[in-house]
Amino acid sequence: MGDLRPDQDVENVARGYEKAGASALSVLVDAVHFSGELRFLGRAKSACSLPILAKGFFVDPYDLLEARVAGADAALLIACALSREELKNMLKTSREVGLATLMELHDEADLAKVEGLELDLVGVNHRNLATLAMDHELSASLAPKLPVARGRVAESGLNSAKDFLRMAALGYGAVLVGTAFMSQPDPGEGLARLLEECHACR
C-alpha cells in the first residue's frame, strides 16, 4: 500500500495512541517489507508508557534478543514462517529474556503446529501473507479451536466499530490495527473517534 508514514513520526504517533486510549503499541521493525527500523522501538518507548510489541519476521532467537535490547516488551511470532521445533525454541528464548509473544495464526495448519505449546497471546490474522487477500471470516472459524492463551488478538482488516464489537463477541480481547489508523493524518485521533463509536454502539 506504499509508505503510509513517510515522515516516520514515531514519537508523535506513540503519544497520540496513548492519549486516545490504546492498550499497547505495535511497532514495525522490518525494513525490507514495511520500512520499519529496530530503533523505532526505543523511540516509541521514550515517548509513552505503553507496552510495545515488535512486529517483524523473526526467524532466529537472536532477533528476539535484539528486539528486547532495543526496548520491546513483546514480539510477534508468525506460525507459518517457522517449524514447530523452531517455534518451541523461539518461545523458550523469549521467556529467558523476559519477552512476551504474540503467536500469529492463519489457518488450521498453524493451529496444529502450535498445539500443546505454552502461549502468551494468540492472534488470528485475516490477511493471507502469500496473496495479501483478506478472509474476514477467519477469526470466527478459528475462534472455537484456538489454543489456551492469556489473551486473543484479532488482526488486520478491522476499521470500524462494528468490526471491533464483532471481534469482542467472538471472544477476542484485543485487536491489532495498523493501516486503518496509520493512513490517517493523525492516527491517535482516528483511534479516539473509533473508540467513541464503540462506546456509543454498546
Image (tube, rainbow, N blue to C red):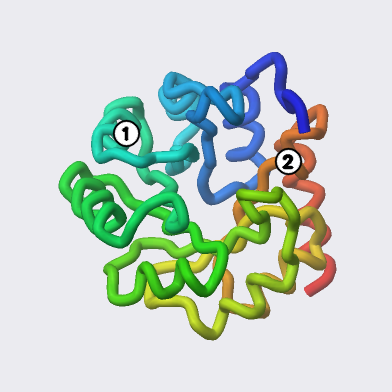
Residue at image position (51%, 63%) is 105
Image side of residue 134 versus residue 108, left or right:
right
The percent coordinates of residue 33 (x first, y second) are 59, 30
Residue at image position (37%, 36%) is 72
- Please name the amino acid that badge 2 sits on: Thr
Q: Residue furthest top?
A: 7
In this rendering, which labeled residue sits more in front, label 1 or label 2?
1
Residue linked to disc 1:
63
Image side of residue 130 versus residue 197, left or right:
left
For mark 1, give the secondary structure. Answer: helix
Decide which of 18, 177 is in the foreground and name it: 177
Residue linked to disc 2:
179
Could you tell me how far apart the alpha carbons at marks 1 and 2 are, in whole angstroms?
A: 25 Å
Residue 15 picture quarter: top right
Q: Quadrant of the C terminus?
A: bottom right
For mark 2, give the secondary structure. Answer: helix
The percent coordinates of residue 100 (x first, y second) are 33, 51
